[in-house]
Image (cartoon, coloured by chain):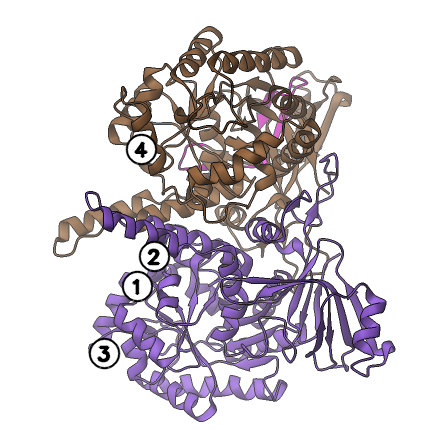
Chain colours: A purple, B brown
Amino acid sequence: MSPQRKLLLLGTFVHSKTAQHLEFLHNAAVAVDEQGKIAAIERDVADASEAKERLVKQLGWNEAEVDVTEAAEGQFFFPGFIDTHIHAPQYANAGIFGKSSLLDWLETYTFPLESSLKDLSKARRVYSRCVRRTLAHGTTTATYYATIDVAATNLLADLCLSMGQRAFVGRACMDDPEINPAYYRDADAAETLRATQQTIDHVRGIDPGFDIVSPILTPRFAPSCTREAMAGLAQLHRETSLPIQTHISENLGEIQLVQRMFPEADSYAGVYDKYGLLTHKTVLAHAVHISEAEASLIAEKKSKISHCPCSNTCLTSGPARVRWMWDKGIDVGLGTDMSGGYSPSILEAARQAALVSRHVAMGIHVPVDDDDGAAAAAAEKERVKLTVEEVLYLATRGGARCVGLEEKIGGFEVGMEWDAQLVSLSQVSDDGGLEEQDDSDGFVDVFGWESWDERLAKWLYNGDDRNTKRVWVKGRLVHRRS
Amino acid sequence: MSPQRKLLLLGTFVHSKTAQHLEFLHNAAVAVDEQGKIAAIERDVADASEAKERLVKQLGWNEAEVDVTEAAEGQFFFPGFIDTHIHAPQYANAGIFGKSSLLDWLETYTFPLESSLKDLSKARRVYSRCVRRTLAHGTTTATYYATIDVAATNLLADLCLSMGQRAFVGRACMDDPEINPAYYRDADAAETLRATQQTIDHVRGIDPGFDIVSPILTPRFAPSCTREAMAGLAQLHRETSLPIQTHISENLGEIQLVQRMFPEADSYAGVYDKYGLLTHKTVLAHAVHISEAEASLIAEKKSKISHCPCSNTCLTSGPARVRWMWDKGIDVGLGTDMSGGYSPSILEAARQAALVSRHVAMGIHVPVDDDDGAAAAAAEKERVKLTVEEVLYLATRGGARCVGLEEKIGGFEVGMEWDAQLVSLSQVSDDGGLEEQDDSDGFVDVFGWESWDERLAKWLYNGDDRNTKRVWVKGRLVHRRS
């Protein structure tokens, strides 16, 4: 890669200060060094020349080596989104799930498509589109499931690196002969581990420091893995410290299957714990139906949960309870789980997280003839709803904590890396007219009287990829829209 | 208006044959006369010249007076969407609702904004944008709530007519001094009726046959109206046959309020029935919590329900049960209920209808220790889910039945009017590459191997206004995107 230029970014910066609060930095300047790191942040800067005066000189930089990007009035910089659970091969099936639920969905839609991606030209076509589209939606970090095919999985890693998307790329491990179809499974646990090692070696070859692309150990889910495969992957984790991703407790039928297949464990989380996969570097997707005891175990092990609201609704899995997970002290991020979820967009996942939290609220029973009980239930209904601020936190800092990168990405602080997007909303003209072709900014219409909180709410609820004008990963511009 | 030219449309046409089935007409031709009526439909037409040969000549038309529109490979014509419940003034608040539910949302967000639209320059700005954007999203018919202000309401009617959107425009009636704020209510029932008549007279002046724009009688909801106002509006309905719209049973607090305010009626639906508002031309928005008896009453009176899934989730109102309403024999359409719902798009409403039906399914209790009960519950869970076909029916033919226009719009049949959209999906190139600027077709990516059913599913779940390339109302081209 050619050496990167330094960046100076000017305008309004918005990021999560806490899960409950967004911070708005207006008239601010952020300086990014040639490694993609934030070198300085300055507030109350009048214009580019003052920024250069105060920041560039103070850092001892040469003006000629700095590219300046100024956000226009009403635009703002926001941290890049982090998708903590997405199936790259299933990009081609986005929106196609019929009336299925998890187990028949796997058989009908998913395994046939995934298997077909051993054809590398097809894999290149689907993966290129997936990475381009997710970048265009502001996803600067994606935690990918690929397929069992090593060459195709390695190709996905190549594409992420060349397009500049930060990615964890997981070669899907599935060696159980009962659950996995004969046409799409590993021969045995040894094959699972050998193939996994091949992807690790490949990624080490293209990105030795795992700066942009990292392998991730990926037992598909307990029912698809033998005990030997799980234990072997856990051993590999202990040797390499590589992160782990898998699914947990998405669907009631799946949970019964786990109980039947693993009678030696007292719960689904217990299976992963028994075979060494419940670690502080483990991301568990879904966790819709986990028990109190499982949540406590997950919290104790510091494993993370990827909340996939869109998928959980589409596949009728159930409404997951983020507030309760937070109460338990578990770190939660967002996953599109495409194509269990139809959308490649984390903004859509954040929107769906807000909506699903309202379905959780609506499901809380309010007792009649018990005033105290009714008041408590009403308060709990209010409490479980997620706010705009909270779902945008899940999409950024929450996701960063899930993938162990909270010191590097998810917010704007000196020493963190510049993974960000420039967001633009449509400004309504005085007469409200809309030229027929004027949809370049999407359809989030700002009239001018809205507070900044309201602008962020408008973006969350009606925003799309048109609002994301520029995307950077580690200081590199990886997507640009006119 | 200048006389319209005749149209000849060629390509693939998709519409609902029944609530469960989409019909796909490939290589078809539709001829539309200068009144905007479908004069002929021909299947298996090879190309434009054959279409002209077979259709134009057969109709005795002159080729020179016919405009030809040919759908490109992969594009299709679809009936225009019908929004059976949308608040035009609230367009400016789309996405802004915080953690509110109905009654505090009205007070905090809605009444202040609506009241401010007595400023006609502000009303013009908001209404112009609302009509442009909904047209751009393929809404060819909208059933609008406006505000209490007559001049602003009449302006909305003017704008719909000039922009060519078929619309029912309702001047909001709210004269109850207890519920409505002093700064935003009618002085009394007489004022309610006088103001309503002024809007009726205005619309009769600009569109005497109510061909494009019609008034609609709009008691906001029972708690906001006095008995006198409701009875007066019912009398007006009997004299004029004008349609009626109102809200029903959206929120539990609202229902308690109705019980307290109208002790003479045995239910919320009973209030409307008692005061003459429950007619075959009445559209009731929401109906989330109606009882069996209320549903039977609504069915008996042949009143319609506008299902507003997005709003019902955003405002934590509850998940409405469309399958159950259908079981009862009630006609159901879709409403955005913007800004109770965040989106101006009926495609989004259809998507949310599919999702909310899945939440209804997930809320069905499956008994343990009762095999028959469990099997029945599992079957019911399956049954209540709405399919792609069903929610697209709700968005078109279902909506047409709600507004009494099922003979005119919602499908493609000879004698119906040409209210339609041309839909285009993005075709993925062989290498899967995506030029940075190439988002003109949105992000519904078709790889080429998808069936037509799957293409429609992809459009439903990830489509947006970018996919709607052209929109016609009554044969007039009212929106065009490059």
> Which residue in the protein does label 1 denote?
A289
Taking the magenta stretch, the answer to whether it contains residue B142 is no
What amino acid is at disc 1? His
Residue type of the residue flagged with mark 2: Gly
Q: Position of residue B232 (x, y in %)?
A: 44, 11
Magenta extent: B17-44
Question: SS class of the residue under badge 3?
Answer: loop
Who's the residue at 22% across and 71% down the image?
A: A259
Mark 4 neighbour class, 10 Å CA radius: few under 14, some 14 to 19, many 20 or more: few
- CA gap between label 3 and label 1 equals 17 Å
Instruction: Give the vertical position of A51 relative to B258 (above or below).
Output: below
Q: Which residue is mark 4?
A: B256
Amino acid type shown at disc 3 = Ala
Chain of the residue under label 4: B
In the rendered image, which quarter contains the C terminus of chain B? top right
Marks 2/1: CA distance? Answer: 8 Å
Residue at the spot 48% in from the left edge and 85% down from the top edge? A242
Residue A83: % across, % down: 52, 67
Label 4 and label 3 in one chain: no
Mark 3 = which residue? A265
Q: Pointer 4 and pointer 2: residues touching (CB < 8 Å)? A: no
Q: Are marks 2 and 1 in contact (CB under 8 Å)?
A: yes
Q: Chain of mark 2?
A: A
Q: Position of residue B9 (x, y in %)?
A: 65, 31
Do residues under tags 4 and 3 come within 8 Å of each other at their CB atoms? Answer: no
What amino acid is labelled 4 in the image? Gln
Gap in angstroms between the C-alphas marked 4 and 1:
34 Å
